[in-house]
Amino acid sequence: MSLIVQKYGGTSVGTIERIQAVADRIAKNYRSGHQLVVAVSAMSGDTNRLIDLAGQIDQNPSSREMDVLVSTGEQVTIALLCMALNKIGIEARSYTGGQVRILTDNAHGKARIREIDGHRIQQDLDDGRVVVVAGFQGIDDQGNITTLGRGGSDTTAVALAAALKADECQIYTDVDGVYTTDPRVVANARKLDKITFEEMLEMASQGSKVLQIRSVEFAGKYNVPLRVMSSFAEGSGTLISLEENEQMEKPVVSGIAFNRDEAKLTIRGIPDQPGVAFKVLGAVSDANIEIDVIVQNVAKDNSASITFTVHRNDLPAAEKLLRQIAADLGAQEVDANADIAKISIVGVGMRSHAGVAAKMFEVLANEGINIQLITTSEIKITVVVEERYLELAVRSLHSGFNLDTSDS
Amino acid sequence: MSLIVQKYGGTSVGTIERIQAVADRIAKNYRSGHQLVVAVSAMSGDTNRLIDLAGQIDQNPSSREMDVLVSTGEQVTIALLCMALNKIGIEARSYTGGQVRILTDNAHGKARIREIDGHRIQQDLDDGRVVVVAGFQGIDDQGNITTLGRGGSDTTAVALAAALKADECQIYTDVDGVYTTDPRVVANARKLDKITFEEMLEMASQGSKVLQIRSVEFAGKYNVPLRVMSSFAEGSGTLISLEENEQMEKPVVSGIAFNRDEAKLTIRGIPDQPGVAFKVLGAVSDANIEIDVIVQNVAKDNSASITFTVHRNDLPAAEKLLRQIAADLGAQEVDANADIAKISIVGVGMRSHAGVAAKMFEVLANEGINIQLITTSEIKITVVVEERYLELAVRSLHSGFNLDTSDS
């Protein structure tokens, strides 16, 4: 008998029929002998309906009251799912975040889980019940309702699995697993059976939207095996765990992530002196603009140049700020470019394989794609290229690193 | 500075615009120096929407889960009302029943309040905040969400007022007060400025729908002055309190209540022996049929006859049962009649005035209305008449006891 925590997202519980289908799936798992704790999101559309009501009153409402409001969405789902389970003969009991006592900090709308009291849930499991918990929400130490922010239901599930020492945490979603890259860009992208936490984190942070980064971090930290599965199809999904792929011949690269949400800024000809990077990037960061890739170089004339990327929406503000900074520092020029794309190859296999970067650059060179920026980490190499080359670059790398379906 | 508890029902908070209007009214009260605690219902229609969702899954869902589901309705309202208050510069904080700690028994769907912890609310009031509480809900001692049943928001308000020792509990509704009788029947019915708890209870139990009986009982028990007011119009409403009307010339009758929801049953010619009433009425009550008025008499031949009223919907079942009982007891006949109406005159003034009953019967006799049944209590006289005489009887009594507007 295993203890499994399952999480069903808003689309999976979006209608009464789908809630009933989820109940059937849970019943099947329960009847095959597992103990089950289920975390659910609000029915798709419900959270937006509530946010819209608030927006009619105040475009910038109190975050405390916003959490009181939107947390009702999951509360509706837990009650309906328990009713559907009861209806097919499964004893089930629902709990809000506050009732479980999912204790968070008091950062309304983006709270972080501090502690979960698994005692009451364990009692229900021991009594043979399925336990259904509202995802995405908790309470702070003053008893105020908090929410973890969008996507927080994944984190709820992982945190529950960690607190209850569950054997596996299954995230049900509308895709059937993690792919080597986005199948909409590369038709023969391949579903991965296994991937490590580290790889999943790098994939997620580079734009793969399958799982929330926080939930993967959490799962990695507490070593909770995480499985991404489809609510709508059968199949064993993708298992995300500590272990590397056991195959004899480990693949060097596990997947390719990309995004086109960023823009690039360069400030050139800054008189090189200690603290230049801080003066430039500190000011940008103080303006609440998040910076992603950063590259600094020193030119022949000893002047420095710094290039970094920001979210495309922040480009106008960042450019304006950078021109001020350039004037203050006596820099030569500022350059802004929104037509870029970021591509990363990710794989724990890189650690033990030399020449992966060289191979990546070779593949891109063969297609005549110019690389504007390069950064590397232990299990990831990221390049920035002109946006129009994105699809070509991803497809070439996918086959260049033997990720196509035909090779598996 | 007074501490006032206000309650706004579903119609009063039925749209965003109405919630904003309620916020304006609260702001006005707050700015004139009062401390305010506000209990609210779900937006009208929302509870039915939730019940309908449950009904799509199970016509007879778990009452525990039903409470988890429907309690979200008030939670939405408290958040929106706080946002509307904040928007116009009033600091406000919302609490669910569980957060206040409105402790109830565990009778899901019809729970009774055991205890309210006013500590947290008092802290907010001391800090200058308006406190908004979800009506209709609480938690049991296991932390399960409970609801008080429909109309329970009135009870929440009164219980809060009692726990906080409020100066007044104001129930905002869609009528502007308690009337001497239903203005739809008597055009010159008069709004009462004051009425006692006892009178209000008798009026409510006789069919006046302005307030839930439980909330009036509660207010009387804890001596919480209760004021019924309109959400949509100005005015001071009707104050319900312990004190009798201070006018020199107290009115003998304060109001006239009536209903036509009942039917009358008579069993005649029962051989009179001890326990006859129990045999007849005990059996009816065992069948879960509620009995209202009961009259027993003994005829010349020493046989007994018993007449009682039940809800009109229960008439077929009650009649069938009564015919069985009649056969068992050897009674002569059973008579069933649905075309009746019940009319009550209510007033604490009756205590000190003789001849009120005689006056009532005289008024009805003058109109040629035959009285089928009579029962009396200390502050109420009830008659049952043919249904077609209802309006005529109420109008005649209204002017007979000087209740018409022109007399005030």
Image: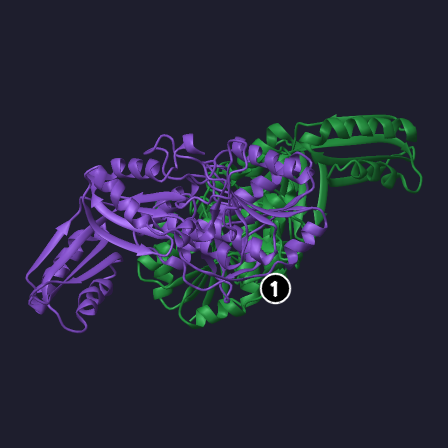
Chain colours: A purple, B green
| Residue A98: percent from left, percent from top | 54, 57
| Residue B5: percent from left, percent from top | 48, 61
Name the quarter where the N terminus of chain B is drawn.
Answer: bottom left
Q: Is residue A247 left or right of residue A53?
A: right
| Residue B235: percent from left, percent from top | 40, 54
Residue A383 visible in this rendered orientation of the protein: yes
Residue B245 visible in this rendered orientation of the protein: no
Residue ID at (38%, 37%): A402
Q: Nearer the viewer, residue B132 or A36?
A: A36
Q: Is residue B157 left or right of residue B303?
A: left
Q: Nearer the viewer, residue B163 or B188?
A: B163
Q: Is residue B387 left or right of residue A344?
A: right
What amino acid does circle 1 point to? Tyr
Q: Is residue B257 left or right of residue A403?
A: right
| Residue B70: percent from left, percent from top | 54, 44
Chain containing the residue with disc 1: B
Residue ID at (89%, 32%): B270
Decide: few, some or many residues near mark 1? Use Cα within 10 Å; few <14, some 14-19, many ≥20: some
- Judging by the rendered image, the residue that carries numbered circle 1 is B222
Q: Nearer the viewer, residue A118 or A267?
A: A267
Tell me if residue A406 comes above or below residue B205 in the rendering. Answer: above
* Badge 1 element: loop
Tell me if residue B356 comes above or below residue A279 in the rendering. Answer: above
Q: How many marks?
A: 1
Q: Nearer the viewer, residue A52 or A259?
A: A259
